[in-house]
Amino acid sequence: MRFLSHLSMAVALATAGSLTLAALPQDAQAAKKKKEKGSEIEISKEVRPKVAAIQAAMATDTPATAKPLVEALLAETLAPDDRFVAGQLAIQLGGTLKDTQLQEKGILASLDSGRTGPEQLPGFNFFAGNFAYGAERWADAAKYFQAAYDLGYRENNIEPLLAETYFKRNMYAEGLAKWDEIMNNAKASDKQPPESWYRLARDRALASKDKNLYAAWATKWAAAYPSGDSWGDAVAANRTTSQGDSAQNLEVLRFMKASDSLKTTRDYKEYAEEAQRKNLFGEVVAVLEEGKQKGVISAGDPLLVEVLQPAQREVSGDRASLPAQPSGVRGSGSSSVMMNFADVWLGYKDYDKAVSFYEAGLTKPGADMNRGYMGIGTAHAYAGDYDQAKQAFAKVSGTRAPVASMWQTWIAQQSAPATAAPAAAVEEPAS
């Protein structure tokens, strides 16, 4: 697929500032000199009659008769100025005839001459890249697109095209590194990369079958454009890189709830059943009630009879039986016992009590420090105490670290000022 069609290319080239050549057969014309010697284009005596013949043919009712003359001139070994002029003639005639192959020859000749002006170089390199892209000459396309990009060209979706030249060669790591560079350059210029760029990069990372690349780019998308969809994708991607135990799975689901990325009945069912296995009745009720309120769980869903109603019957007695503070736990209370009580209080949305039990659990022998700090961070985040949540999540390491990092990013988004409307969407290239 080409981002710039052949017809669009012809129109663009017609307005790209190609050199307007006067007929130059007269000696008087050749004698004219510009004040800025060295910047002028001087046609050699040997080529001047050929240029005149081409121009004469182009001016007739049958300009196609000029094509073999132009191609013959391009085939010669020419001095830089002569090659530049031959290229300009090919561009002009190609536009008249809607002959893109002739236009491509003209662009390449103009670039190869070294005489293309700075105002034309960015566009001409882009056009050369576009022709190569259409012909599936990916390395050539990458070379010319990169040259145009480095010269400041930012039109016609050059950024996705440049990255795509790597993916077309199955160079996924290099293509994603190029996306990273492009996005960082845009940010440095105070331009927010459009969401379509992140989606494209995420899609290519997924196609690479490299789980770590996919997780990284899904998370970048969610960080730049947070939504239930983007965070859900980031969570799903990160889940593929590490398989945690049941407790860690519940922690992931808690983050999904906070980031509004529980989207399907299956999501709510998984959450409710995970909490049910741990007798977290308050959490079961809270998540299923949310699913009902959002219309994700229908009134006739078996979950309501099989999971929600039994949990509702347990809530009152369960909550009344809980110790209100760590010192009320019978016996010494192991670390896991303290953290289990913390989980229960978290489900009942009593976040202060949850934090106190997690902290008590951390002081016990054999404490799972990462579980404790993850719980403390989650409780503070749910309560809106973001500074304290960040401090706790910063202490999480190991297999829980990716989820803690997502929490950190999500917290930063909650306190970030509202951003301006994102840039217009960029057309995505066909696979």
Image (cartoon, rainbow, N blue to C red):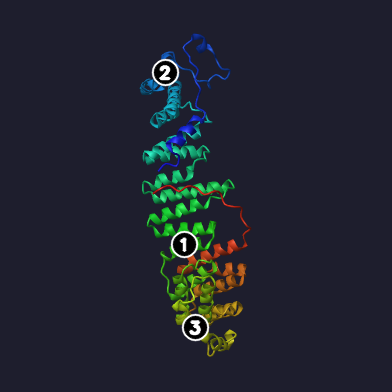
Residue nearer the viewer, 409 or 154: 154
> Where 386 falls versus 333 (above or below)?
above
In what element is the residue under mark 1?
A: helix
* Residue 363 is at least partly visible in this image: no
Q: Earlier in the sequence, mark 3 or mark 1?
A: 1
Give amino acid for label 3: Gln
Q: Where is mark 3, residue-wise?
A: 309
Apparent side of residue 47 relative to residue 316 in the rendered image (left or right): left
Give amino acid for label 2: Ala
Residue displayed at 43% across by 34% down: 128
Circles 3 and 1, Cβ within 8 Å, touching? The answer is no
In what element is the residue under mark 2?
A: helix
Residue 233 numbered mark, or none? 1
Q: Earlier in the sequence, mark 2 or mark 3?
A: 2
Apparent side of residue 3 relative to residue 318 in the rendered image (left or right): left
Alpha-carbon neighbours of circle 3 within 10 Å: few (<14), some, or many (≥20)? few
Q: Position of residue 376 (x, y in %)?
A: 56, 74
- Distance between mark 2 and mark 1 Cα atoms: 61 Å
Q: Position of residue 130 (x, y in %)?
A: 43, 38
- Distance between mark 3 and mark 1 Cα atoms: 31 Å
Residue most extreme to the right: 417
* Residue 92 is at least partly visible in this image: yes
Apparent side of residue 243 relative to residue 287 in the rendered image (left or right): left
In what element is the residue under mark 3?
A: helix
Q: Where is mark 2, residue-wise?
A: 57
Q: Quadrant of the N terminus?
A: top left
Residue displayed at 53% across by 58% down: 223
Alpha-carbon neighbours of circle 2 within 10 Å: few (<14), some, or many (≥20)? some
Q: Position of residue 264 (x, y in %)?
A: 46, 68
Give amino acid for label 1: Asp
